Amino acid sequence: MPKRKDGGIGSEKNIRTMVPAVEHAARILHYFSTLDAGSANLTEICQALGLYKSRGHAILKTMAEYGLIERDEATKRYSLGPALVPLSRKFLKHLDIREKALPFLENLARETGGTALLGIISGEHLIVTAKRDGDTRLGITIEIGHRFQVTAGAHGKAIVSFLADEKYKKIMEGKKLYFYGNAEHYDQERLLEEIKDCRKNGYALDMGDLQPGIHAAAAPVFTGKGSVTGTLIVIGTFPKEKAPAIGERVREAAGGLSTAMGAQTPDIFNLNQAISS
């Protein structure tokens, strides 16, 4: 590991006070967070982290005992374990943006009858960090911690429409894009038209492309620096003729949440949107 002199992670000062086994376990967890495949064998892990196999095996075995790592006995490959789910949920519950989002989500769920979600971008995924259910008879079950492909459906279009040019270009040049469900259904001409509409209206729609009969409206949430950090989404079985009105309501809520987070947003977002009682 390269040594830093500024007192941060990896600095000479911190290395002297680190417990080696704990450090290796932490590096293993970080390593898995970067894997597209989601799993790796012992050789791959040890080579990537510079560990002896005997040392790596012992640490992985201990982590597996506590559910932090999972081993597939058939393939002998390791992946992140189930014990991380409640840990991540505990962490997500304390995110500042989540607390600020809850009143907006409650209003959206009540007014639209749909399930209102806050999703935060994490690499190639959008992680659901908060939710409120509207009409519980609809049977749409999405739990906190659920991961969507970042380019999927309404939220994917809402995110891409307001990315900086460099990030926009990188995503659009990707080999697999999930705006319309399976990557094989990708339609660039259609997508460009919808991005144009999203930049004009401030929201994007998915009318059954991801799942027949299930519709969604999404609008981007911005950080203090004006970059997209995630989306607000309403998912439900609302009729197509109501979709634009729901989209506008989601845009207003996303603008209000972005303002609450101290963000600078495009003019199309109603920054004066108040949280209704």
Image: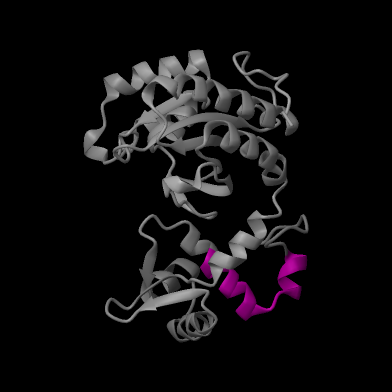
Image x and y of residue 123, in percent: 49, 46
In which quarter of the view is residue 23 placed?
bottom right
Instruction: State whether residue 194 is above or below residue 216.
Output: above
In which quarter of the view is residue 8 placed?
bottom right
Name the main secondary structure of what is drawn in magenta.
helix
Q: Closest to the observer: 63 or 249?
A: 249
Image x and y of residue 139, in percent: 42, 50
Q: Is residue 2 visible?
A: no
Image x and y of residue 110, in percent: 59, 36
How many numbered discs sit on the rendered protein?
Answer: 0
- Is residue 243 found inside the magenta-colored segment of the image? no
- Taking the spot 51% from the left edge, 25% from the top edge, the residue there is 246
- Taking the spot 50% from the left edge, 15% from the top edge, the residue there is 201
For the N terminus, the image quarter is bottom right
Q: Is residue 78 visible?
A: yes
Residue lying farthest left?
A: 184
- Taking the spot 35% from the left edge, 34% from the top edge, the residue there is 179
Left or right, 57 with respect to 209, comes to: right
Left or right, 247 with respect to 13, comes to: left
- Taking the spot 65% from the left edge, 21% from the top edge, the residue there is 265
Q: Which residues are magenta?
A: 12-29
Q: Closest to the observer: 216 or 260?
A: 216
